[in-house]
Amino acid sequence: MTVPALQIANVHRTYRQGENAVSVLAGVDLSILPGEMVALVAPSGAGKSTLLHIAGLLEHPDQGEVFVGETATAGLDDVARTRLRRSDIGFVYQFHHLLPEFSARENVVLPQRIAGLGVEEASMRAAEILGFLGLSHRIDHRPGELSGGEQQRVAIARAVANTPRLLLADEPTGNLDPGTGEHVFSTLLALVKQSGLAALVATHNLELAARMDRRVTLREGRLVPLP
Ligand code: ADP
């Protein structure tokens, strides 16, 4: 049986603000297989970011378990969680958050160096991924010299630089015009299918959601499938 890249089991999360308790996640279950791209479509405030943070080991659930591959994470200490996050999870946000002083290639090299790869190897892999994403001709440009769509493709390249098994994306095309967003999304889809990466993508864009393998939404703190 194929091991899911991400498995979330009965996750609960409640925020307390003074007297009030807001139950955001109330028994969330989700399993994503390698090569599967799942759209998370829900209105603002429904808990998408909370779920992405918990899936990305950036936040602890109050209850429940998150498996990344075969690893159960509830009992891990912060050092082990950080290590697992760095090796197995990539993040893409609405804004690219690239380092402005570094070239596209250097932005993709950096996480690999942090993971312990040598300069040559990291540089070759950066060129390979940027090439796959159609950016060979922009490899030595800084973010400020790139278009919005190019910047976001560099951010995707950086997110997958350490060959994670899971990609978490929060409105990855939300800041782009429709045509550019479509291009960036198509590139991301091709990357997922080619690499066997699993992806959970929060989006308000129903057209893009329709092109993913599955769609889910949050209703009263639980995940339910959408058609
Ligand atoms: P979404 O990403 O779908 O817009 P969020 O996960 O950001 O939703 O937020 C879900 C709910 O939880 C909102 O009502 C928000 O105000 C609340 N919330 C999120 N983070 C916190 C926090 N750190 N402290 C208190 N309330 C929070």
Image (tube, rainbow, N blue to C red):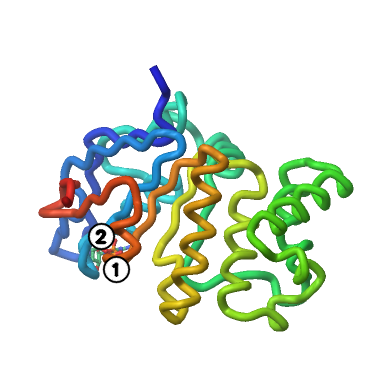
Distance from disc 1 to disc 2, alpha carbons, whole Å, reads 6 Å
| Label 1 with label 2: CB-CB less than 8 Å | yes
Q: Position of residue 37 (x, y in %)?
A: 39, 47
Front-most of residues 85 and 143: 143
Quadrant in which residue 20 is drawn: bottom left
Residue 146, which numbered label?
A: none
Of the numbered discs 1 and 2, the one sitting upstream in the chain is 2
The residue located at (46%, 63%) in the rendering is 185
Direction right: furthest residue? 120
Residue 204, which numbered label?
A: 1
* The N terminus lies in quadrant: top left
Mark 2: give few (<14), some (14-19) or many (20+) Cα within 10 Å. Answer: many
Front-most of residues 31 and 182: 182
Front-most of residues 10 and 225: 225
- Whether residue 168 sits left or right of residue 134 in the image: it is left
Q: Position of residue 114 (x, y in %)?
A: 74, 48
Front-most of residues 61 and 98: 98
User: SS class of the residue under badge 1?
Assistant: loop
Q: Amino acid at mark 1?
A: His
Q: Quadrant of ligand 1?
A: bottom left
User: SS class of the residue under badge 2?
Assistant: loop
Residue position for label 2: 41
The residue located at (73%, 67%) in the rendering is 104
The residue located at (35%, 63%) in the rendering is 208
Q: Amino acid at mark 2?
A: Val
Rendered view: 129 above or below 3:
below
